[in-house]
Amino acid sequence: MSEARISGKRTKNGNRHGILFDFTFNRSVKLRSQTPNVTANAGVLLLREADQRLGVTRDIAAKLQDSRHPDGIRYSLTELLRERLYAFALGFSRQDDADIAAHDPAFKTAVWDRPGCRVADERLASQPTASRLVSMLATRRNREELREALALPILRHQRSGTEDRRVQLGVVDIDGFPVETHGEQPGAVYNGYYGKTVYSPLAAYFSVNGDFASRRLGEGFLRAQLRDGNAPPAGEAELFISKVVNQARELAKTVAIRIDAGFASADILNQIDRAGARFTVRLPHNPALDRLAQPFLARPSGRPPKEGHEFAVELTGYKNPGWDKQYRVILVVADKPGKNGCLSLFPRYFFIAANWPPESMSPGETLEHYRQRGTFEDRLGEWNALGVNLSQDSFAKNEVTLLLSLLAFNLLEIIRAEAESANDPRTNSPAANYAGWDMNRLRNILLKTGAVLSRGGRRLWFDLAEGMAPLWSAVLTRIRRWKKREDSTPPPNHSDFIPLPRQAFLAYTPRL
């Protein structure tokens, strides 16, 4: 690179006035690096404000076991946990990315649990410290605490409204999903169905009414656990579902479970019914069900309509020998044309079992209720799009990474719900139409926002990109209307900053 021909004193790195490069397409455009007070991650301040109001990270950290010697602690467990969760939420999915967040002015301001302006000067934990955090959380006790903590943001967000009570109907979707691994991670196994080496985590997602149509307070991943890549669909599901139902009872008066055919064992359905919860499950085909379906499969005479036929009808006379009682069985005939515009030789059909009373949910409503489960699968896809890598050298550490990333996802869900419900305070009209925005789009537009940090009057001023100001104002207005909550853990004792070790970098130094 040729030296920039600009008058002025040469800086220590050999450039004049911090100029790094001259652009040939326009000689008036220069690239320089002169100030450490620019951030592209101003949205981390939104996350901290919501987190602070709900007290999520602080209360989770209070339940975790910190095995470090107190004399050598520079970063509290709350600050380490906060830095990792916010990094996941902002797209820093790898541990090496901790070095970027450690020097970012918005991250430094949001993560430190201390008042005053000095927080913008003190760098955060680096990659080795982030790695030690995961190792410390990998104990059985800490993993269980993290697993239980997934429900905390959902509960706190739900109770942040004016009415401190459970919703009428909460729907929990449960399924396993693949997470591809690269390397030789313990427990990761080649799965022939996916054609990849994967883990197969089990996850439960809570939503109000189960329709995902309107944003409501309190939705997110309720529980999760990591499983080997060759785990059967319902492997370890009975205990998992039992704990999910108990957690969901704190959120909803009526709990409904939606699961696919891999979970349709008699033991699981009986377990859900005995617990007083509702279920809707797709049943695998068997000869008895196929015989009952035959009278409904005959196509009407005449030319079929262009869109084909679809209907749902309740079957009688089927009783699985393992069922405690007679559950409803619904036949769904989906006789739709294929890509060539023609119907298949025989009608397509499947079965749904449910323990909803007939007067509460008709066959057609049961079908529609079950189909809304597809949005839950979209949530799993959004989590995958965050780019989280389960690349640790132990199964327990990979489970910690999974649980932390899902906690971060729940924090993002809170911001998404408030953004979709926000009104511009100046016009009392929607500040932005965020309905249907996926998590990546929300993060890249709302959270990955540029800002410049300046100081004045013993204050830290973040000058936000002008176009985002109305939406930010609307979201923060909603957050500050949340009902005040008494902290379950006392505020931290603020102490002086422990000096950095001599080998620590004072500015971000990428590994090339």
Image (spheres, helix red, strand yellow):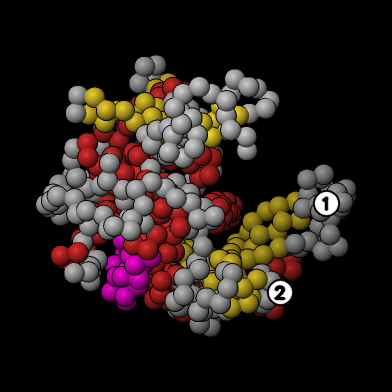
Vertical comparison of 28 with 234: above or below: above
Query: Residue 136 colored magenta?
Result: yes
Residue visible at 78% across and 45% down in the picture: 307
Query: Which amino acid type is shown beneath numbered disc 1?
Result: Lys
The numbered disc on residue 291 is 2
Residue at disc 1, secondary structure: loop
Q: Is residue 179 above or below residue 11?
A: below
Q: Looking at the picture, how far across and down is residue 491, in whole percent? A: 14, 50
Number of residues whose C-alpha sits closer than 10 Å to that of mark 2, classed few (under 14), some (14–19) or many (20 or more): few
Q: Residue placed at 30% from the left, 35% from the top?
A: 479
Q: Identify the amino acid type marked 2.
A: Arg
Is disc 1 surrounded by few (<14), some (14 to 19) or many (20+) residues within 10 Å? few
Question: Could you say which is closer to the camera, residue 348 or residue 80?
Answer: 80
Residue highlighted by disc 1: 339
Q: Main secondary structure of the magenta part?
A: helix
Q: In the rendering, which numbered label is found on residue 196?
A: none
Q: Quadrant of the C terminus?
A: bottom right
Is residue 217 shown left or right of residue 62? Answer: right
Magenta part of the chain = 131-152
Quadrant housing the N terminus: top right
Q: Nearer the viewer, residue 27 or 218?
A: 27
Q: Residue at x 62, y 34 (%)?
A: 2
- Examine the image and state in which quarter residue 366 appears: bottom right
Classify residue 464 by image quadrant: top left
Mark 2 vs 1, N-terminal side: 2
- Image height of 179 relative to 18, above or below: below
Q: Is residue 373 visible?
A: no
* Magenta span contains residue 49: no
